[in-house]
């Protein structure tokens, strides 16, 4: 049993076992808790010493299914509002199974023309969906963090070239610190990308005109005027606490006036472009030098999925291009090789679930989903405003609702501890999942509505459970 070759006849049976469990599990998502803490003891079944001879294919898959379907956090369901997480549409989930089945090495044309062509097609489709020029280069990444890394790495190379240096080849030694400017909405993923690039996590100069973080354009304009040489501006399309947006069009004006690079982190907010009624929120994104977004958020494809777009496709090649290894394609290879356009070398064919969901539901289906989730966010916002013991802390802009429990008679200085307690109890309860944050010094709930399964009943349950838990406060 030890060598998998001895169980090659079990491959189809193992997949059939997973397929057999999939139907009941997916049908149960609408009614089961998001997390059943009573099932946590099953996690012990994953543990133990490494088996000497192996327990066999079917036994191992059966155990994984048993533990996973009970003890997993059911974030693919309609009531997971914690962080900013989507689900997996039927087409995307099946496309991801196809990805595992075919197991393509998706970085080079030579290893998989199929995966390469699929990636080329979905990048074009995504640019159409987001209103980005078709001339932009692009690459699929594991996440928006990697997409931010890709865009900002290109910005770093561009900045170095303007100092007469090839940063990709020679590094940053001898160069001044690359100026990076942003409003208060800058996300930790952009800072993580900058620290990875050697530019410093805390080197970002933040220009905010209020404690919410709204960008101070005039102060940024003055600072850009004082900088000797090129700079990089990071704009945010969709802030995680409230769903608010930097004025991308105004930032593009600043970048144009000062010869700066504009990078837009549109992890989930970029999807506003799919809706005519919401696209004004990302007006100007088509003028950015680089744009990042996630697929496993509002596109509702499985983890891990992100995409980066760069105005100058050749710059992507200069930043991540061929290493001169004899076994790899040469720089003049006529085929696109996505390994040379982003930070990864080993890449699964992550285009396949994206291709499946875009083809299955099209532009109209994704527009309808975005607008439905916006309507649900507005519904929750209205419920909060109508409730005497709830307080809406920021206008509902897109799909995030930032609010807190504020019953009459409770002093302001006690509200943060009370709302933190409600947040912990909400996660322990498990019927709905929504975490807390700190917004303008206040502890708040900030459910994000992006799952394709979510309906009005799920939104109403969220509000009901929050008030039910709050009513039993100590």
Image (cartoon, rainbow, N blue to C red):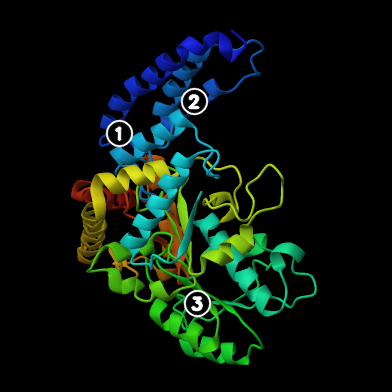
Where is residue 131? Give x, y as percent. 33, 67
In the image, taking residue 208 as reference, residue 410 lies left or right, namely left
Q: Which residue is label 2 attached to?
A: 41
Q: Earlier in the sequence, mark 3 or mark 2?
A: 2
For label 3, the residue is: 183
Question: For the residues carrying marks 2 and 1, which lies nearer the camera in this image?
Answer: 1
Residue 20 x %, y %: 32, 20
Dot 2 or dot 1: first in sequence order is 1
Q: CA distance from mark 3 to mark 2?
A: 45 Å
Return the residue nearer the eye: 186 or 321.
321
Label 1 to label 3: alpha-carbon separation: 40 Å
| Above-or-below relation of 68 to 386 | above
**In the figure, residue 259 lies in which quadrant?**
bottom right
* Residue found at x 44% / y 80%: 252
Residue 406 visible in the picture: no
- Dot 1 falls on a residue whose secondary structure is loop
Q: Secondary structure at mark 2?
A: helix
Q: How many marks?
A: 3
On screen, residue 355 versus residue 57, left or right, reads left
Look at 42% across and 21% down and name the residue there. 66
Q: Earlier in the sequence, mark 1 or mark 3?
A: 1
How far apart marks 2 and 1 lie (CA) works out to 18 Å
Residue at 64% across / 69% down in the picture? 157
Q: Which residue is mark 1?
A: 32
Q: Residues within 10 Å of mark 1 (few under 14, many from 20)?
A: some
Q: Position of residue 42 (x, y in %)?
A: 48, 24
Q: Secondary structure at mark 3?
A: loop
* Location of residue 159 with respect to 338 vertically, above or below: below
Specify whether 167 is left or right of 446.
right
Horizontal and vertical percent position of residue 368: 21, 56
Q: Label 3 neighbourhood size at 10 Å, few (<14), some (14-19), many (20+)?
A: many
446 or 406: nearer the eye? 446
């Amino acid at each position: 049993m030890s060598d998998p070759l001895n169980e090659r006849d079990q491959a189809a049976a193992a997949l059939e076992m997973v397929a057999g469990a999939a139907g009941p599990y997916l049908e149960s998502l609408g009614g089961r808790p998001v997390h059943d803490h009573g099932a946590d003891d099953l996690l012990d079944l994953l543990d133990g010493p490494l088996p000497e001879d192996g327990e066999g294919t079917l036994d191992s898959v059966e155990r994984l299914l048993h533990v996973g379907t009970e003890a997993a956090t059911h974030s693919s369901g309609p009531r997971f509002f914690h962080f900013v997480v989507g689900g997996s549409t039927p087409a995307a989930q099946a496309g991801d199974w196809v990805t595992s089945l075919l197991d393509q090495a998706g970085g080079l044309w030579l290893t998989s023309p199929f995966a390469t062509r699929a990636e080329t097609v979905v990048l074009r489709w995504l640019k159409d969906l987001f209103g980005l020029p078709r001339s932009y280069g692009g690459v699929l990444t594991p996440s928006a963090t990697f997409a931010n890394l890709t865009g900002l790495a290109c910005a770093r190379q561009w900045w170095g070239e303007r100092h007469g240096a090839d940063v990709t080849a020679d590094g940053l030694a001898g160069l001044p610190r690359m100026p990076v400017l942003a409003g208060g909405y800058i996300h930790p993923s952009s800072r993580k990308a900058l620290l990875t690039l050697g530019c410093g996590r805390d080197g970002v100069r933040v220009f905010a005109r209020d404690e919410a973080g709204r960008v101070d354009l005039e102060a940024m304009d003055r600072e850009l005027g004082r900088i000797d040489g090129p700079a990089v501006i990071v704009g945010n399309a969709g802030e995680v606490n409230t769903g608010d947006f930097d004025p991308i069009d105004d930032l593009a004006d600043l970048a144009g006036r000062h010869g700066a690079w504009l990078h837009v982190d549109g992890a989930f907010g970029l999807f506003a472009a799919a809706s005519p009624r919401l696209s004004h929120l990302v007006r100007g994104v088509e003028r950015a030098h680089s744009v990042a977004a996630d697929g496993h958020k509002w596109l509702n494809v499985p983890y891990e999925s992100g995409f980066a777009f760069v105005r100058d496709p050749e710059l992507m090649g200069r930043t991540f291009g061929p290493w001169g290894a004899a076994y790899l394609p040469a720089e003049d290879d006529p085929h696109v090789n996505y390994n040379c356009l982003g930070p990864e070398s080993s890449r699964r064919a992550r285009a396949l679930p994206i291709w499946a969901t875009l083809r299955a539901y099209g532009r109209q289906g994704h527009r309808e989903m975005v607008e439905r989730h916006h309507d649900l966010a507005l519904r929750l916002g209205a419920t909060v405003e109508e409730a005497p013991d709830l307080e809406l802390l920021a206008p509902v802009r897109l799909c995030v609702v930032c609010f807190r429990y504020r019953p009459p008679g409770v002093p302001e200085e006690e509200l943060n501890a009370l709302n933190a307690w409600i947040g912990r109890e909400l996660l322990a309860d498990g019927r709905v999942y929504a975490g807390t944050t700190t917004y303008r010094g206040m502890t708040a709930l900030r459910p994000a509505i992006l799952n394709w399964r979510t309906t009005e009943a799920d939104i109403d349950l969220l509000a009901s459970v929050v008030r039910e838990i709050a009513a039993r406060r100590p």
